[in-house]
Image (tube, rainbow, N blue to C red):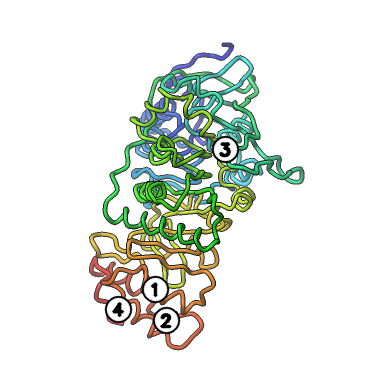
Amino acid sequence: MPFARLSPAEAAALIAHGDNVGFSGFTPAGAPKVIPLALAERAKAEHAAGRAFKIGVLTGASTGKSLDGALAKADAISFRTPYQSDPDMRAAINAGRIRFFDMHLSMFPQNVRYGFLGKVDWAVIEACDINDHGEVVLTTGVGAAPTFGKIAPKVLIELNRAHPAALRGFHDIYTPADPPHRQAIPLTRVNDRIGSQVLKIDPSRIIGVVECNHDDETGSFRDCDEVTKRIGYNVAEFLAAEMKAGRIPKEFLPIQSGVGETANAVLFALGDHPAIPPFEMYTEVIQDAVIDLMRQEKVKFASGSSLTISAERRKAVYKDLEFFRPRIILRPQEITNNPEIVRRLGIVSCNTALEVDISGNVNSTHVLGKQMMNGIGGSGDFTRNAFISMFICPSVAKQGKISTIVPMVSHADHNEHSVQIIVTEQGIADLRGKAPAERAQIIIDQCAHPDYRDELKAYVERSGDTHTPQAVADAFSMHEQFIRTGDMHGVAW
């Protein structure tokens, strides 16, 4: 191999204060580990010596504790985009110590190429194999690595021996041309292959290779509880009814699902429902439920940007790669989330909300309107272009002290024109073709927790006779009540 072999510390020493670094991965899957840890240690040493050291961090989505977590703890980040989920990173963002730019994940790679986010000085890319020609086999996540590998003048490869080189063939690397030369993306089926199995990087730009052996930092999700099981059941029942009504074809449609316990519950419910046939996934994140349902022949194929599965599932997949090879494709995020493809394939999207208001607007990012949780991620990419767009959430949070159904969302990520279906454990609100007053009634009656229905109905009454039920002076009274007392109950309208 012609590339210089470096230690993590030697690689980190090459990156300067003020550089912008594009890291591979999409969730902790495929994210570098040892180079970011070495960067964090370097930042601590520089700060102790009275010298500044911070970098801009660009990634496909969230990463692991060795990247976002370690760098945030070391106060080594000046700027972060487009999505994160680490608690230390979140705390630093909300304290104003890190500038964070939230954006749709499908837009991120092209905005990097367009130069909208400034220069990218370095790319740090995790691989399971590389040859002398600069052909890189990625690991469990693709994300924005193809764009970083294309535009960064200097590239570091983290060659992670925890992932087998036999992953070659699982990836489909395709980058659209930029305007005015862009053409239609030639993908018409979930399992189409349109690109390369490897990421091709000019060997002259590969500054060095750092070897390691570190597993992905993905944890296991909790088992489904009664609330998440009920949400999953409600989603499955709704889609089965859509099939019966002829609005979804008998062969079904591809599913996009968010990440987490509730999303897993939805997928398991779809797999268990007798009226729903084996289905395909066209999504961002392939998680544990998908692997289990493939084994049961309930999921026929899955296209995603990352294989974000627990260590137990990952070991099982690696022991049986030939079973999964014809069933899984990992793509760049601007293909998995591309509005053109989402609209073409007729995807049914299912994403998680923090809160929903009685007009059908959804907040998926901010607590009480100002504290960032993770970011919008890809939910908008799918919601705005889906065949059917659904948002799911429990009807209450914090042991019932918060109603997730509110008069007006404290931060709007998805407006009423994009949101079609709301599902909680209480029931389903089908907002298609409904006027604002009708939407308010069905959301309160079908999705709100019984403990909050009277408060929400009282708010609607205060709005008077109008096209859209809204009492401006009272719109955030439930939020204000929580801030004052720690409980949304008991608003005196």
Quadrant of the rendered image containing residue 479: bottom left
Callouts 3 and 1 close, C-beta under 8 Å:
no
**Mark 2 to mark 4 CA distance (whole Å):** 16 Å
Tags 1 and 2 in contact by the CB under 8 Å rule? yes
Q: Earlier in the sequence, mark 3 or mark 4?
A: 3
Res. 460 image quadrant? bottom left
Q: Which residue is mark 3?
A: 332
Camera-side residue of 73 and 217: 217
Q: Secondary structure at mark 1?
A: loop
Q: Is residue 258 above or below residue 484?
A: above
Q: Nearer the viewer, mark 2 or mark 3?
A: 3
Residue type at mark 1: give it: Pro
Q: Please say if 34 is above or below 268.
A: above
- Residue under the image location 39 percent in, 63 percent down: 355
Q: Which residue is drawn at the image coordinates 36% and 80% (left, top)?
A: 459
Residue 407 image label = 1
